[in-house]
Image (cartoon, rainbow, N blue to C red):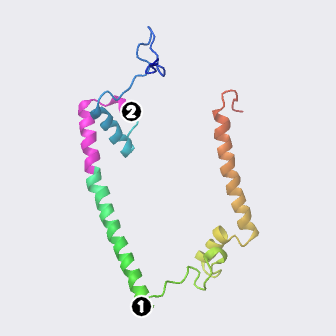
Amino acid sequence: GITNCTAAGCPGTEENPEPCYNLYRSIPMASYYSLLNLFGEFPLIDNHNVAGKIVGTLVAIVAVAVFALPAGIIGNGFEDIVSQRHDEQVAARGGAPPPPPGGDGQLTAGFVGDAETPRGRWYNFLHAQDSKESKLFDLFINVLIVGTALTFMIDTLSGVSPV
């Protein structure tokens, strides 16, 4: 025989005839919630009336037209200029590929910054880690990260009370 499993996930009762209540009763309502979630405006989403939903939708569309489209156009133009400069450099070298970032044929894994400049010293401290202090600083940051993560995990446990 055939088994009907349509109500297996959310069976209704007399107290709660519709346990799987869904906010998305229509395609326009689902579109509105999708639009707000795409733009990150989901807090207090249920408190908007019809006029607020219309204004919010129009503001979101104008925001895309004013900010997102010009950013894409400018980014595309920037990419074209970078590609054009790269092609010019390859043509100037006679078609040879550019050298690797290290300059001497080596990758940047063993690169050490210039110790005479503040920028080089900061690079050596944060990235090259060529001193004991920089390694201790890196260890300290990692301990802070792990400690913060553990604190939040312990805070979510129901049987643990704060000290």
Q: For this rendering, which residue is in front, 30 or 147?
A: 30
Q: Residues within 10 Å of mark 1 (few under 14, many from 20)?
A: few
First of labels 2, 1 by sequence position: 2
Residue to which mark 2 is pinned:
44
Relative image position of residue 46 (x, y in whole percent): 36, 29
71 relative to 120, above or below:
above
Q: Secondary structure at mark 1?
A: helix
Q: Residue at x 30, y 64 (%)?
A: 73
Instruction: Say which of 10 and 125 sits in front.
Output: 10
Callout 2: helix, strand or loop? Answer: loop
Q: CA distance from mark 2 to mark 1?
A: 58 Å
The single residue placed furthest to the right in the displayed view is: 132
* Extent of the magenta region: 44-62
- Give coordinates of residue 2: x percent, y percent: 45, 19
Left or right of residue 128: residue 56? left
Say the numbered circle drawn on residue 2.
Answer: none
Numbered label attached to residue 92: 1
Q: Is residue 130 above or below residue 137?
A: below
Q: Look at 65% across and 51% down and name the residue there.
A: 145
What quarter of the picture does the C terminus occupy?
Answer: top right
Where, by quadrant of the figure, is residue 19 drawn? top left
Q: Residue at x 66, y 70 (%)?
A: 125
State the residue in front, 14 or 129.
14
Mark 2, Cα crowd under 10 Å, few <14 / some 14-19 / many 20+, is few
Residue 110 spot, x, y in % from top left: 67, 76
Magenta: main secondary structure: helix
Q: Is residue 39 left or right of residue 144?
A: left
Query: Label 1 is placed on what type of residue?
Result: Ala
